[in-house]
Amino acid sequence: MRSADLDRVRSLPLFSVMSDELFKTVTSGAFLQKFPAGTTLLTEGDAVDFLYVLLDGGVELGATWNDKETTLAVLRPVSTFILAAVVLEADALMSAQTIERSDILMLSGEALRRAMKEDTALACAVAQELSGCYRGLVRAIKNQKLRGGLERLANYLITQKVRQGGGETFTLPHEKRLLASVLGMTPENLSRAFAAIADYGVVINGPQVTIARPAVLERLAKPDPLIDNHTLPTTAPIGKAQRERWPTAQTRSPS
Amino acid sequence: MRSADLDRVRSLPLFSVMSDELFKTVTSGAFLQKFPAGTTLLTEGDAVDFLYVLLDGGVELGATWNDKETTLAVLRPVSTFILAAVVLEADALMSAQTIERSDILMLSGEALRRAMKEDTALACAVAQELSGCYRGLVRAIKNQKLRGGLERLANYLITQKVRQGGGETFTLPHEKRLLASVLGMTPENLSRAFAAIADYGVVINGPQVTIARPAVLERLAKPDPLIDNHTLPTTAPIGKAQRERWPTAQTRSPS
DNA sequence: CGGCGAATTGACGGACGTCAACTGCTGTGG
DNA sequence: CCACAGCAGTTGACGTCCGTCAATTCGCCG
């Protein structure tokens, strides 16, 4: 494993508190693996033996029931995942799948649990990380149960705008079909929601989104600091630059 | 505070691992308060200074947005709540309100955070508790995003049946309007769902529910161990016995 | 006895899922 | 180099689920 990668892991809040010695112990039995897009890392119900750390690329956390599927989160580097299952030595409740070519570090869950028992600072850091994840899910449930589809989309767009620097135009970070799943709707319905949100000053051009009248959109979205997290959940620089090219001004076809 | 109450707290997984000395420190600055039904303990957005422990009664955790309200969980003794906010020293994301006369122990958050730093076993126990809460929320989101209202109700009934001993008839633990909020629907819609679920062998008689043909109901519900937790989240004996009396057989009025 | 809130029921409309057809881009192989 | 298949995205038609409004019943409590 490259030492640059090790440094990135070390800089996560989870690991920055550990002693050098313990860090070496925990990472000694670790793999760094590169996966192509679309690889299933973990299926819900699987026993979990590793703590995963996404160093590069992207990962979708999803779940299934009765032939329906939904996305619970999309992770960007640097993020850890399935920490809760590792702590409890339990089966995974979510599936994990790469959405791009990804570099993923796999740390022994057993080693992590042992390290927690020996290092109070680490155990506290784990508790804090889990608290943050928990609160992220509380926000997600509130978003899901309290808002309608159009409102969820509007707030998603505002969050993206802020996270990407606040410029009036930005780029959707994923495929729209994945976004639909994150927002809890069908791709068709998302398409209609994009069409409807044009009335609120939002111009869609492929993956490019321009918020022409932020005040109007905000009146629809009613963003709320107790639901929308406009700062990133972990130390996570947004993924690589998106493609810039896109067929020129493809506004709505004049019917 | 009565020593019997202290013992109940001590028996929680969170506190059973602490040394006597540390336990005394943490509980020394604690209040035991009795609240009437309907008391708001905490409003979303409030700063959180205490870890709450529900010793008797019931508490609803809810959230609000844009004049809509929803229930995220209903707690029964013995349960702790808002642990995550205490760990992070953050504002509450949920409101908490008693639904019955309740005994609630309030522990200094500051003292708990200090104790975590000194006692690895406690910090690990906190991490485990938080992991359990996190996984509970993952289940809740899956339930919400993957199932329709009728399916959520069917699974709720099966869960209640199991938790109350598996007999063919049991008692709803709360008001129906609260249940509706937990299940993410309106009271009117829940009423219709109860009417519709009669086709699957479920007989409703006030708060009494009889599942006449479990196999039929299960074919509708398709319960899943990765969503439905048929065992209780914490060491939580179900609340006191419900009223038994109810006006005799109030089946559907013969139109 | 009277008022209040929970629960139910009906009527209606809107939001959302499903099915199907169509477009345009992309990668593949003849 | 082009033909083709495959997939993302869009659009329309339609049906279902669910929320809203209103009226009614019933038990509870003052």
Image (cartoon, coloured by chain):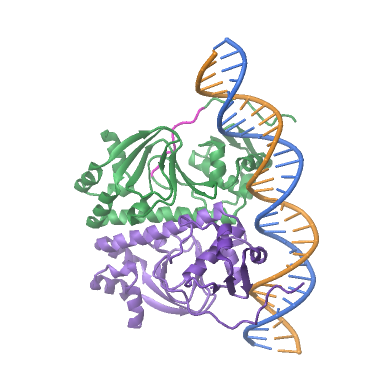
Chain colours: A green, B purple, C orange, D blue
Instruction: Work out whether A238 lies above or below B27.
Output: above
Indicate yes or no whether the magenta region holds residue A237.
yes
Q: Which residues are magenta?
A: A235-243
Residue furthest to the left in view is A21
From the top left corner, tell me how far across and down residue A228 is, in percent: 52, 51
User: Visible in this render: residue A53?
Assistant: yes
- Magenta highlight: main SS: loop
Q: Residue at x 73, y 74 (%)?
A: B253
Instruction: Work out whether B250 lies above or below B226.
Output: below
Q: How many marks?
A: 0
Res A169 → quadrant: top right
Indicate yes or no whether the magenta region holds residue B165.
no
Q: Residue at x 59, y 56 (%)?
A: A146
Instruction: Work out whether B231 lies above or below A238.
Output: below
From the top left corner, tell me how far across and down residue B14 is, in percent: 33, 67
User: Visible in this render: residue B71?
Assistant: no
Q: Nearer the viewer, residue B108 or B243?
A: B243
